[in-house]
Amino acid sequence: MRVRTLLAAIGTSVSLTAALAAPSQPTSVGGERISVTVDGAGPDVILIPGLASSSEVWAGLTSNLRQQYRLHRVQVAGFAGAPGVPPVDGRVVAPVAEAVAEYIHSQQLEAPAIIGHSLGGEVALMLGARHPERVGRLMVVDALPFYTLLIDPAATAATAAPHAAQLRDAQLGAPAPQAEAMQRTAIERLAKTPAARPALIDAALRSDRQTVADATYELMTTDLRPELGRIQVPVEVVYAYDPLYGIPAASVDATFRNAYAGTPHISFTRIDGSFHFVMLDQPRAFTGAVTDFLGR
C-alpha cells in the first residue's frame, strides 16, 4: 500500500481550509508562477505545498508558528484554483523552484528555511542544490528525490519516461466523473483523517489538469539524486508510516535512507500513525518536528 499511496500523491492534491486569526499580507512577487502570502514576524520560513495543493495546507502550522517566525506560504500557479501558466519546455516543477529563488532574492530574505511537502519537497531539493547560497536549511516532507524508485528501484529517468507518459495521458483523457472518482479513491490513501478529505478533493478538482499532468510527468522523470551532494545546508527528511501500509516500518525507513544516500548534513524523522499528508493526520507531531528543525 505504501507504493500506491505515494504514487497517488503524484497525481492528486491536498487543501486544508482553516481560518487564520491574524491578517495576512498577500504579495505576488516571484513572477507569474507563484504567489506568496506572508504571516507573522521573525526568521523567514518558506512553505511550499505539494502537487495541486492549496497553500492553505499550511494554515494550521502557520497559526502555531506565526508568533516566532515570518511564514511565506507559496501558491503554485495552476493548483487549487490558481490560474495556470504555460510550462517551460514541458516543465512545471523546475520553473517553480526558479521562481522561489527569485522571490528570495527580490525580497532580500537572509537564508530562509525551506519546508516543502511532496512536490514542494522536490522544489526544496532543487533550491538547495541549484541555489545553495539562498537557503539556510531544508525540510523535505514525505518526498523522494526520484519518485519512480517506488515502482522500480533500478529505474532511470529514461526507463521511467514511457510509464510517466501513460499516466500523463490518462490524467488528461479521463472524463470528469472518472477523474473525480479517481481523486476520491486516491485521497483515501493519502489522508488518514476522514474530515480532511472533502477539502482535499475540492483542491484537486479545482486544479488545472494540464498543469497537474505536466508536473506529474516531470516528477516521474526527474532524478535529483546526482544533485544531492551539492546541497550545503542541513536537510531534514520527515516521512510518514502507518501499519495500514502493509509493510514493515523498517522497509519504509530503508527506502528513504537509500534514496538520500550521499546527501551531506542529513537527518530523518518518521512520524507514525499518518498517511502522506503528515500535517493533516498528525498535526501536533508535525508541528513538533518543525519546531525542533527550526530551533537547531
Image (cartoon, rainbow, N blue to C red):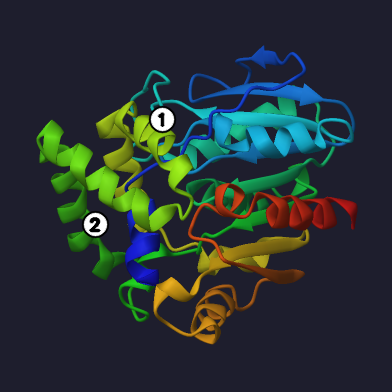
Farthest front residue in view: 195
Residue 175 % position (x, y)? 9, 35
The residue under the point 58% across, 65% down is 239
Residue 130 % position (x, y)? 62, 50
Q: Classify 219 as above or below 248.
A: above
Q: Can residue 194 be seen by looking at this rendering?
A: yes
Q: Are marks 2 and 1 in contact (CB under 8 Å)?
A: no
Position of 208 with respect to 133 (left or right) is: left
Residue 175's label in the rendered image is none
Residue 155 % position (x, y)? 33, 75
| Closer-to-camera residue (282/263) | 282
The kind of residue on which mark 1 rests is Phe
**Mark 2 or mark 1: which is in front?**
1
Picture quarter with the C terminus: bottom right
Position of 167 with respect to 115 (left or right) is: left
The residue under the point 13% across, 41% down is 178
Q: Earlier in the sequence, mark 2 or mark 1?
A: 1
| Closer-to-camera residue (202/294) | 202
Q: Classify 41 as above or below 167.
A: above
Position of 222 with respect to 39 (left or right) is: left
The residue under the point 48% across, 85% down is 248
Q: Can residue 219 be seen by looking at this rendering?
A: no
Q: Classify 217 as above or below 61.
A: below
Position of 233 with respect to 219 (left or right) is: right
Neighbor class of circle 2 (other Cα within 10 Å; few <14, some 14-19, many 20+) is many
Q: Kindly state the secondary structure of the residue where label 2 is placed.
A: helix
Quarter assignment of residue 29? top right
The kind of residue on which mark 2 rests is Ala
Q: Which residue is mark 1?
A: 79
Picture quarter with the N terminus: bottom left
Q: Which residue is mark 2?
A: 164
Spatial CA distance of label 2 from label 1 is: 20 Å
